[in-house]
Each structure stands twice: as C-alpha cells, then as structure tokens.
Image (tube, coloured by chain):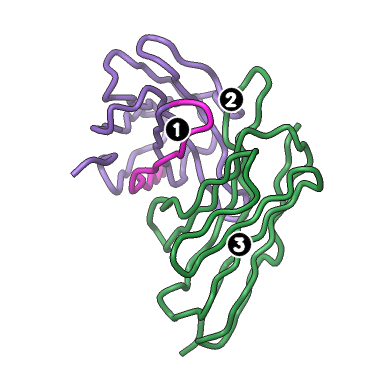
Amino acid sequence: DGGITQSPKYLFRKEGQNVTLSCEQNLNHDAMYWYRQDPGQGLRLIYYSQIVNDFQKGDIAEGYSVSREKKESFPLTVTSAQKNPTAFYLCASNRGISYEQYFGPGTRLTVT
Amino acid sequence: KQEVTQIPAALSVPEGENLVLNCSFTDSAIYNLQWFRQDPGKGLTSLLLIQSSQREQTSGRLNASLDKSSGRSTLYIAASQPGDSATYLCAVYSGGSNYKLTFGKGTLLTVNP
C-alpha cells in the first residue's frame, strides 16, 4: 500500500538534546512538508522541499533542520535551539503545487 | 498574508442531520482549496480538493463548494453519522514565492446518536 510513514509515534527527550523525526513516502511524490500542530493554533509549516537536495524554510523554521537526500525521505531534526519543541509533528507530501496533499500519522514529541 | 478562518469552532448535532461547515480566506489568489478530516491523535485525511477553476466537488455524502471571489468555501455533510465526529480542517494553496497550504484552525464536529 502506498502512503506516508512517520516514526516513532511517540518520542520523549530531555531538554537540550537534539532529536530526529523520520518521514518516508512511497507515493513517488516530489514535494514533502513538515508541519507542527499545537492546541488552538492550527497547523504551521516548518520546512518544505519541492525536489531532492533542495528545501525551503516555512513560517517557523527556527530551531529545526531538515535534509532531502532521497526522494522518499525527509527527516526533521528538532535541535536544542527550539524553545518549545513539545508538539505533534506531521509530515505530508504531494506531486507538486496544486495537487492533493497527503499526511502521515504524526509523531508526538514530548521534551521535559 | 493569507489567513483562513473556520466557523463555527465547534458544532454538535443529532444523528441524521444535514450540516454545513464554513471556511473563509482573505486572499482570493489561490490555486486550490482542500478539506481534511482529523481524528484525535491522528494525521489528516484528505476529503476533497477543489481547484480554483471549479465551483464544487462531491464525494459520497460530502459536497464542497468554492466561491473564490468572495473568499468562501462550505463543506456540506448529508445525513450525518456518529462516525463523522472529528475535526474538519480547510486549507488553501496560495501562490507567491512560497507555495504552501495555509490552514484554518478547524471545526470540531460531534454527531450524537
């Protein structure tokens, strides 16, 4: 079955540690996205990539980093510079602009 | 800057009722509008995508309309069922230098048996 997988589902980290969230898709989509969801705030775009080896900052990129070395993979690293990292993180992909966007199941990150 | 508003924030209806969820956006220069469903603790499931040149899209009991000039979209759910209970989100794909989806905060729908 084609789709987007995110791992792990739940992640717990101590403050000051970097953590990497995985996102893999087998939909042969060119574009991939990372969003953050907080209660009462809706989804906010962190980073997006329209093609391999290229990515752009979204609205809240500070404290995050990404890479896009393979078409199928778009990992997100939450660094210690991110002041409020506890949130629900969602990865998405689509064929490109104006195409339907599909989402993964999400990773809930808790930093204490 | 594109802003998306969804009204109401929460809605509770009895089973079987037809209902309408509203979405408005401030910049009419959009490529498309997408409606999603989100169950608690889960990712988003795409329901309908309406291109900017279209007026409406239908899928089963769902019908979404788009009035780009007035910056509005509605999601009509016919004969609601308890399984329709979820948060419904609309999002618009805007042009400019950053091609991205801008989301509303969603409408939490509860359908009571």
Q: Residues within 10 Å of mark 2 (few under 14, many from 20)?
A: some
Q: Amino acid at mark 3?
A: Leu
Q: Position of residue A25 (x, y in %)?
A: 27, 33
Residue position for label 1: A34
Q: Disc 2: which chain?
A: B
The magenta region covers: A96-112
Check the image and report above or below for A54 versus B107: above
Mark 3 or 1, which is nearer the eye?
Answer: 3
Identify the residue at horizontal 46%, vertical 39% (top origin).
A100
Q: Amino acid at mark 2?
A: Tyr
Chain B's shade in the image?
Answer: green
User: Do labels 2 and 3 touch, CB within 8 Å?
Assistant: no
Q: Residue furthest left?
A: A1
- Chain A image colour: purple
In reply to whether residue A109 is colored magenta, the answer given is yes
Chain letter of the residue carrying label 1: A
Q: Secondary structure at mark 2?
A: loop
- Label 2 vs label 3: CA separation? 24 Å
The answer to which of B104 and B76 lies nearer the viewer is: B76
| Amino acid carrying mark 1 in the image | Trp
